[in-house]
Amino acid sequence: MPDTPALGLRDRKRIETRLRIETAAVDIVTAEGLDGATVDMISDRAGISPRTFFNYFDSKEDAILGTQDMGEVQRTIAAGVASAETDDLVAAIVSTMFQIFGPLAARTQLKAQRMALVQEHPRLLSRQIHQFTQLNSTMAAAVVEFLNKRETTLPRDPEHVAEIAVATCVASVRIAVKEWIADGATADIDSMYLRSIGLTRETLNTLQ
Amino acid sequence: MPDTPALGLRDRKRIETRLRIETAAVDIVTAEGLDGATVDMISDRAGISPRTFFNYFDSKEDAILGTQDMGEVQRTIAAGVASAETDDLVAAIVSTMFQIFGPLAARTQLKAQRMALVQEHPRLLSRQIHQFTQLNSTMAAAVVEFLNKRETTLPRDPEHVAEIAVATCVASVRIAVKEWIADGATADIDSMYLRSIGLTRETLNTLQ
DNA sequence: GTGCATTTTTGCAGTCTCTGCAATTATTGC
DNA sequence: GCAATAATTGCAGAGACTGCAAAAATGCAC
């Protein structure tokens, strides 16, 4: 992915503004709490009008989470699972997830703060889980393709199997990330990946 | 569970009002859509003032979902998984979930409508997922106990394995219920249970 | 039944989120 | 420059939700 070839002033400004809003939102919520932070305060710090705030985000929560266009994420998923070289479904799903959230390893102050907020405020967690859930169906579709392509002991209901498989892997990634945060967010992304795979395997052994 | 021993008029009325609100909420949202239904409309049909609405529910969404006290649910879970006679973890989890949502089989117009609404409106789904997530941690704790009690090849991280196992089983139950709704909600609860177990097994086979 | 304590309901005023619309301003391609 | 396009903004307004204090309903003595 080349670094955005020819970005005009307009687009550069938009990206910049978006980031300013996200930063302002996370900062103020960190300082004042979720209910203590109003859209007015955030807009004010970001240097825009409250009305403009809603041109960038649908809600206060979205601004805090930095919700972005899901289009690219979805394309990454489809490509990732489809192009997996392994026949190991777990590895294919988990590694795709780390492709998506890998940039999380190159973490910024903003991202670290954001993750802390999500752990702290149930309302945010709820919204984030919802986003993950939307991802789930996209991932499940990619997994169905994966299954069909391999043709190895095709299950009766590939769609359903795919959804459960995704739910399982997503849970293991989530837990690996949680651990990672608990450990002070020091480890690198590879160890998170390995940890996540390991958790999945352990669970499968236990369930069998 | 004996039928509420000595309930005064005050308590009976409160329960009745609560149900009237839930019914009104579901009916109006079914007819007018999620945004088309206002708290004023719901309160009006329920025969209460808008202010009283918020004495019963924290939000419109909660009224639609009929959100209730999670205390009893949590006790049911702990008891269910703990008292499971099988050594089969999947069976223990899934059957506990059906213990919880079993009364769903004795379904009412209200519950059927509610489930349809949740499938239809992402905002509701989001809120419900959040509730389930809270349940997950309770279930995971019960599963850890289950694992410890059996002492069969204790995994390195029982807590994490438990969370993933629960996520897997919850997903399979969710999908079984979804199918059930798609089929017109005709089948009985036992077939849902069997379907859910079957889905889990298939997935495990595929993942191994 | 009457009177008193406790709950529940309600109205009201107010804050905050979020939307549609139309005017204004900024960027772009020519 | 100049027109087309896009972003920003103000404004008016709907709707969700809260705190507070008055009013009504209920429970419990007596």
Image: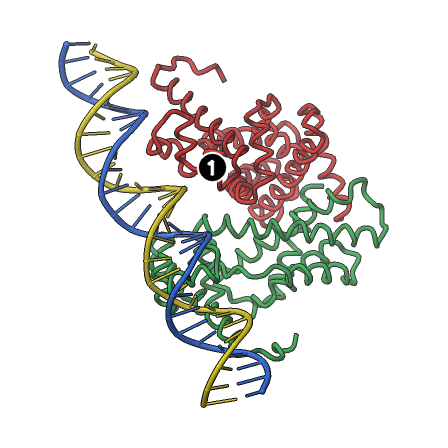
Chain colours: A red, B green, C yellow, D blue
Q: What residue do we see at 55% from left, 33% from top? A: A30
Q: Is residue C5 above or below residue B101?
A: below
Residue A141 in view (yes/no): no
Residue B92 in view (yes/no): yes
Residue A190 percent across, percent down from the top left: 69, 24
Residue A6 percent across, percent down from the top left: 38, 13
Q: Quadrant of residue B158?
A: top right
Q: Could you say whether the residue bearing mark 1 is in a helix, strand or loop?
A: loop
Q: Nearer the viewer, residue B190 or B171?
A: B171
Q: Quadrant of residue B29?
A: bottom left
Q: Is residue D11 left or right of residue B154?
A: left
Give, as a three-letter code, the residue at label 1.
Ala
Q: Nearer the viewer, residue A68 or A204?
A: A68
Q: Which residue lies under the disc numbered 1?
A: A37
Mark 1: few/some/many CA within 10 Å (<14, 14-19, 20+): some
Q: Is residue A66 left or right of residue B82?
A: left
Residue B77 percent across, percent down from the top left: 69, 59
Residue B194 percent across, percent down from the top left: 65, 61
Pinpoint the chain carrying mark 1.
A
Q: Is residue A59 above or below residue B119?
A: above
